[in-house]
Image (cartoon, helix red, strand yellow):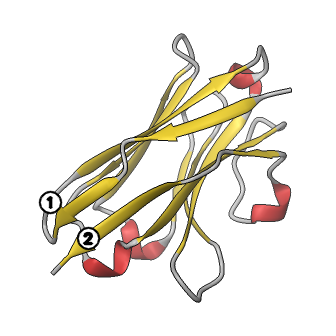
Amino acid sequence: QVQLVESGGGLVQAGGSLRLSCAASGRTFSSSAMGWFRQAPGKEREFVAAISWSGTSTYYTDSVKGRFTISRDNAKNTVYLQMNSLKPEDTAVYYCAGRRYYLGSYYSNEYDYWGQGTQVTVSS
C-alpha cells in the first residue's frame, strides 16, 4: 500500500511562488505515474499536472502551462510541483495522486491512491 503526504502549501501573494512536495511510502513509487489535482471551494476537483514513472513525459492543464512545473526524484520517492507567478484563481486544496501505470492521466478516477491535500491560498 502506498501512502502519500503532501507539504509546502501556504499563503502567498499574487505573483509569488510555492513548491509543493509529495512524499510516498512503498516500493511501487518508481513504477507509478504521479499527478497533482486541486479543488477550490464549491468546485469539482480538477487536473493540474502529471508525470510519467520515468519523468520523461509531463502533462499540464492549460491554465498552468508556463507557470507550474512537475518533477520527481525516484531516489527520494518524492514528486514536486513548482508553482510560479501564482494567481488568486490558483487558490485551492492541492492533492497528490499515484497511478499504477507508467503514464500519467488527466482523469482523477484513473489514479489509485491519494494524499490528504495541502492548502494553497493566493492573495490579491
The numbered mark, 1 or 2, whose residue comes first in the sequence reads 1
Q: Mark 1 highlights which residue?
A: 16
Residue 8 sits above or below residue 105 on the image: above
Secondary element under disc 2, as helix, strand or loop, is strand
The answer to whether the residue labelled 1 contacts the one labelled 2, judged by CB atoms less than 8 Å apart, is: yes
Q: Position of residue 103 (x, y in %)?
A: 73, 43
The kind of residue tagged 1 is Gly
The kind of residue tagged 2 is Val
Residue 57 disc label:
none
Q: Mark 2 highlights which residue?
A: 122
User: Quadrant location of residue 45?
Assistant: bottom right
Q: 5 or 49: nearer the eye?
A: 5
Q: Nearer the viewer, mark 1 or mark 2?
A: 2
Gap between marks 1 and 2 measured at Cα: 8 Å
Number of other residues with Cα within 10 Å of mark 2, as a class: few under 14, some 14 to 19, many 20 or more: many
Secondary element under disc 1, as helix, strand or loop, is loop
Q: Residue at x 36, y 42 (%)?
A: 8
Q: Position of residue 54 (x, y in %)?
A: 61, 26
Number of other residues with Cα within 10 Å of mark 1, as a class: few under 14, some 14 to 19, many 20 or more: some
Residue 113 sits above or below residue 5 on the image: below
Residue 42 sits above or below residue 51 on the image: below
